Amino acid sequence: MDKKILSKPAIEAAPLLLGCELVRKTPEGEIRLKIVETEAYHQDEPASHSFRGQTARTAPMFKGGGRLYVYFTYGMHYCLNIVVGKKGVGEAVLLRAGEPLAGIEIMRKNRKITDVKRLANGPGKLAQALGIKDTKLSGKILNPERKYLTSQVFSDGASKFTRKNSNKNFDGSSKYADIWLEPPKKAIKAKDIMASPRIGITQAADLPWRFYLKDNPYVSRL
DNA sequence: TGATAGATCGGCT
DNA sequence: GCCGATCTATCAG
């Protein structure tokens, strides 16, 4: 994944993350989603959790691009963000929807539904599809791709992978997340990137800081 | 210390 | 389209 994207301000990084693939390794296998909808949040804007400064919850947003920020909301849902920008500036990109590419049976199990279009077409659903049930991943660093992209891992399959990394990643003790980003398989064209106001907020609701892929059936709504 | 709104979702009318 | 679920962070008093 291009490090430069993750060090850009949220408003620039959010559209650039469209088309990127979000991957999570689990003991059951690999889950892979194409990011099709994002929202930018910046600390100078009241809809952002970082607006009122750093707290225990929002600390990851201030630690610099390339980490995860996970928060719990509405008493029952988790939402996954990619922290972007420079250290000391509180900003992140909310992942609002994804198109399932791999690990679909795992996601069906996590979501307790079968319809592929509804596995990750919303921020709470996306987190649930990935198996996120707490905020333990918040603050963790996106796993550098090289850590997993070895011939040993891919020639041997998931079980070997699990053994090899069990004490580093599946018990939550590592500073790295078992999640990372990969660049788009096909470049995204500028004309396919749509912008709209963000969803579910009341403050700064006029800012067009939600981005999604045009005509993609996996976005949360039109 | 109490009230309330919240980066949501699924079920029901 | 509306509403309840269910918990947390924040703000008022």
Image (spheres, coloured by chain):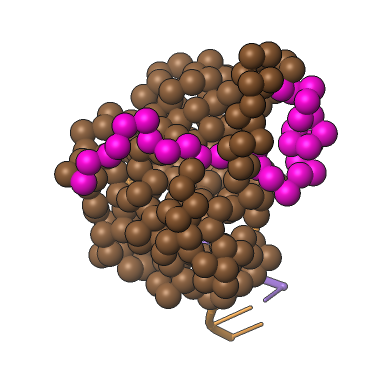
Chain colours: A brown, B purple, C orange
Q: Main secondary structure of the magenta part?
A: loop
Front residue of A62 and A4: A4
Looking at the image, residue A89 sits to the left or right of residue A20; the answer is right
Residue A209 versus residue A37 in the image, above or below: below
Front residue of C5 and A20: A20
Residue A94 versus residue A144 in the image, above or below: below
Say which quarter of the image contains residue A56. bottom right
> Would residue A196 be visible to someone looking at this image?
yes
> Would residue A122 be visible to someone looking at this image?
no
Say which quarter of the image contains residue A93. bottom left
Looking at the image, residue A192 sits to the left or right of residue A49; the answer is left
How many callouts does the rendering have?
A: 0
Residue A177 at what x, y percent from top left? 66, 42
Q: Is residue A146 magenta?
A: no
Looking at this rendering, what residue extends furthest in the left direction? A191
Looking at the image, residue A66 sits to the left or right of residue A94; the answer is right
Residue shown at the point (40%, 19%) measured from the top left:
A115
Residue A160 versus residue A8 in the image, above or below: above
Front residue of A107 and A141: A141
Residue shown at the point (42%, 38%) measured from the top left:
A183
Residue A131 at what x, y percent from top left? 61, 32
Residue A206 at what x, y percent from top left? 25, 65
Residue shown at the point (28%, 29%) measured from the top left:
A217
Residue A166 at what x, y percent from top left? 79, 29
Residue shown at the point (35%, 59%) measured from the top left:
A12
Residue A52 versus residue A139 in the image, above or below: below
Looking at this rendering, what residue extends furthest in the front direction? A151
Q: Is residue A175 magenta?
A: yes
Image quarter of the C terminus of chain A: top left
Q: Which residues are magenta?
A: A161-190
Looking at this rendering, what residue extends furthest in the right direction? A167
